């Protein structure tokens, strides 16, 4: 019988990273304050003591340097897992991500791959300033050469992180910090993988399909339960945004004929538009209503007083589901 622990999502990050480092000496972690302090959210707590300063490396406050160093490490045989304290701080390293991290395999015609995982806490809901709270996953999903992963449960977090570390190519691993400690789940002690590129149907339904990911999965499931007496909702958690599991998305839509997408990123240019376009291209003749986008707004992420209004919650999601059904 497999032994398990009842872990939060952030504990599952640490457990997955620890198992990967214990299994492979080439796996190294680096970032601001991740060593003795264990990271700003304590995602790497205890790893410095266990693996030492040569494998859990405290870096200067220099995102371009952190990511650029990790690119060099990965090109020459290591498997670095750099952490950026908040996803909003990745922008100083954006040139390294787009010009080097994503393109090395193509540029070198396969001579170099970059087995690296760029981790960052992402999203809103913790009463932090705007550069700590935005959701810009579309930036990275748009860039060929990068895989983009956003987990929503502790079990998936550990399995997806181990899969990402074992990938030969770079992965952007965005961790929804709103749910870092929101709930617990039984997580196996031993290493395991959750495959990248596969969505999970969290709730079966027949009336409308809702596609979501990360911290929006729980309020979406809550909204589905709240309208269960009037609408039978199917909830699909994408888990990996690039490559996106189009087959699961399309098959769910063919069953229901109606769809909504829930994400906390802004409305314009968000991945809801990409999902809607995919449904138009692959399942138009099954469509009964326009695809509803239930998202953040086209504004900078607001400060505390308006944060709960900005983020889609169960009430706004339920309203969107009713809109789809009433068309």
Image (cartoon, rainbow, N blue to C red):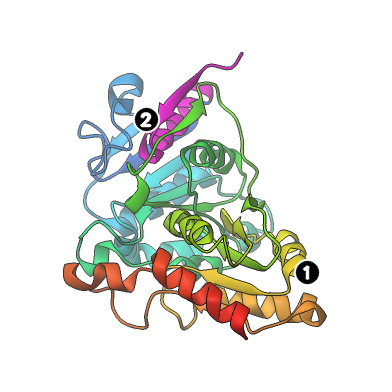
Badge nearest the viewer, 1 or 2: 1
* The N terminus, quarter of image: top right
Q: Is 161 placed left or right of 306 in the picture?
A: right
Badge 1 or badge 2: first in the primary sequence: 2
Q: Which mark is residue 55?
A: 2
* The C terminus, quarter of image: bottom right
User: For the view shown, which residue lies furthest in the front direction?
Assistant: 229
Residue 186: x percent and y percent? 48, 29
Residue 17 magenta-highlighted = yes
Predominant secondary structure in magenta? helix
**56 lies above or below 327:** above
Q: Which residues are magenta?
A: 1-23
Residue 159 lies in quadrant: top right
- The alpha-carbon separation of the residues under discs 1 and 2 comes to 48 Å
User: For the view shown, which residue lies furthest in the right direction?
Assistant: 285
Q: Secondary structure at mark 2?
A: loop
Residue 247: x percent and y percent? 76, 61
Residue beneath the point at 48% across and 49% down: 152
Residue 118: x percent and y percent? 44, 50
Q: Secondary structure at mark 1?
A: helix
Q: Which mark is residue 67?
A: none
User: For the view shown, which residue lies furthest in the top direction?
Assistant: 1
Nearer-the-camera pick, 24 or 104:
24
Which residue is the site of mark 1? Answer: 254
Residue beneath the point at 49% across and 53% down: 150
Residue 163 lies in quadrant: top right
């Amino acid at each position: 019988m497999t032994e398990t622990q009842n872990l939060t999502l952030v504990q599952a990050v640490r457990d997955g990273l620890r198992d990967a480092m214990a299994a492979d000496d080439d796996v190294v972690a680096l970032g601001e304050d991740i060593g003795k302090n264990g990271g700003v959210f304590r995602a790497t707590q205890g790893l410095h003591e266990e693996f030492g300063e040569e494998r859990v490396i405290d870096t200067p406050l220099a995102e371009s340097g952190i990511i650029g160093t990790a690119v060099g490490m990965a090109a020459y045989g290591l498997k670095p897992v750099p952490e950026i304290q908040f996803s909003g701080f990745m922008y100083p390293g954006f040139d390294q991500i787009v010009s080097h991290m994503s393109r090395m395999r193509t540029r070198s015609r396969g001579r170099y791959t970059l087995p690296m995982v760029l981790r960052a806490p992402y999203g809103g809901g913790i009463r932090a300033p705007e550069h700590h709270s935005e959701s810009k996953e579309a930036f990275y999903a748009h860039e060929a050469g990068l895989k983009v992963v956003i987990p929503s449960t502790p079990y998936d977090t550990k399995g997806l992180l181990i899969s990402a570390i074992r990938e030969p190519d770079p992965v952007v691993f965005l961790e929804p910090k709103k749910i870092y400690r929101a709930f617990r789940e039984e997580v196996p002690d031993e290493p395991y993988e959750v495959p990248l590129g596969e969505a999970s149907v969290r709730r079966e339904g027949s009336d409308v399909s809702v596609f979501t990911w990360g911290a929006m999965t729980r309020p979406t499931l809550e909204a589905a339960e709240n309208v269960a007496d009037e609408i039978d909702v199917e909830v699909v958690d994408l888990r990996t945004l690039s490559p996106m599991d189009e087959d699961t998305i399309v098959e769910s839509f063919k069953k229901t004929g109606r769809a909504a997408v829930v994400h906390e990123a802004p409305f314009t240019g968000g991945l809801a538009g990409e999902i809607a376009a995919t449904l138009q291209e692959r399942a138009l003749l099954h469509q009964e209503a326009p695809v509803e986008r239930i998202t953040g707004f086209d504004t900078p992420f607001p400060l505390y007083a308006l944060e709960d209004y900005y983020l889609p919650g169960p009430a706004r999601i339920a309203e969107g589901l009713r809109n789809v059904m009433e068309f």
